[in-house]
Image: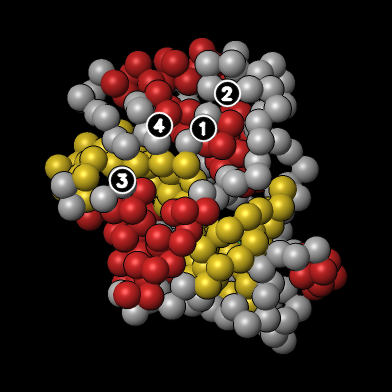
Amino acid sequence: MINERINNAYDFIADKGNFSPKVGLILGSGLGDFANTLENPTAIPFGDIPNFPKPTVEGHTGAFVFGKHKGLEVVALQGRIHYYEGYTMEEVTMPVRIMKKFGTHTVIITNAAGGVNESFGAGTLMQITDHINFSGGNPLIGPNIAEFGPRFPDCTNIYTKDLVEKLNQAATKAEITLQKGVYIMFSGPNYETPAEIRFCRTIGADAVGMSTVPEAIVAAHANMRVMGISCVTNAAAGILDQELNHAEVVEVANRVKADFTKLLSLAIEIGSGK
Ligand code: HPA
């Protein structure tokens, strides 16, 4: 039972310190360095946690890092677990439920994504306003875990509108260009075909990726507030006359690190209610 695994992992982590992060961060491909900036960090590698999934992708080290950012207590997931690695969606979303058990009320989910909207080129930062679950899976399939939330959770406002607006204003003030858009998830691991990208555009998506949606659904189920930030690392397939590769994704994510870090800092303050 997944709940037993979540409880065991929680007990193991809770034993390592007195943690009560109000904000949780999930750091996407090439964006994990932010966890190294936390004050007073305690890192708990996934590999140490009993019966816990381990990330297998290059560019993703796996650890919970508890610490402070500008005096605010947070937990960062450095290296998420992906559906395409062969884990179930229940496993992929274990960290979010563990955060919930620590009292986290707001999750900031980040990712590297392809730009479907033709005006979102490499290096664009996009705030997620909504998503399309095109992954073929759903983390809530199976017996409902009532401890976390209801059988049929509402998803009208997953990416909390009020927080979207606050971050938008803060970004403008800090002179960070921040777009807004809809994120669509494919399972991956292959990048999409040009035909799939045209389809994505037709149905209203602005950015495409292989993560975030499961975590956002599980957070919404548990009545947590969600902020989503995509770092567009490339124009999606078929837009430019070039092929896509993971090295480029990581390279671009690294290139926008300065603005991304500032944005994340603002998001933490807003998410904490400061
Ligand atoms: N497609 C899917 N996932 C991605 C992409 C993309 O173009 N870029 C970075 N992650």
Q: Residue at x 29, y 21 (%)?
A: 14
Q: Separation of disc 3 and disc 2 at Cα? A: 22 Å
Image coordinates of residue 110 in percent, x first then y, are 47, 55
Dot 4 or dot 3, earlier in sequence? 4
Residue underneath mark 2: 149
Residue underneath mark 1: 223
Dot 1 or dot 3, earlier in sequence? 1
Residue 272 image label: 3
Q: Which element is circle 4 on?
A: helix
Q: Which element is circle 1 on?
A: loop
Instruction: Bin the neighbour count of mark 4 within 10 Å (Cα to Cα): few under 14, some 14-19, many 20 and up.
Output: many
Dot 1 or dot 2, earlier in sequence? 2
Q: Is 194 located above or below residue 67 in the figure?
A: below
Residue underneath mark 4: 99
Dot 3 or dot 2, earlier in sequence? 2
Looking at the rendered structure, the kind of residue marked 1 is Asn
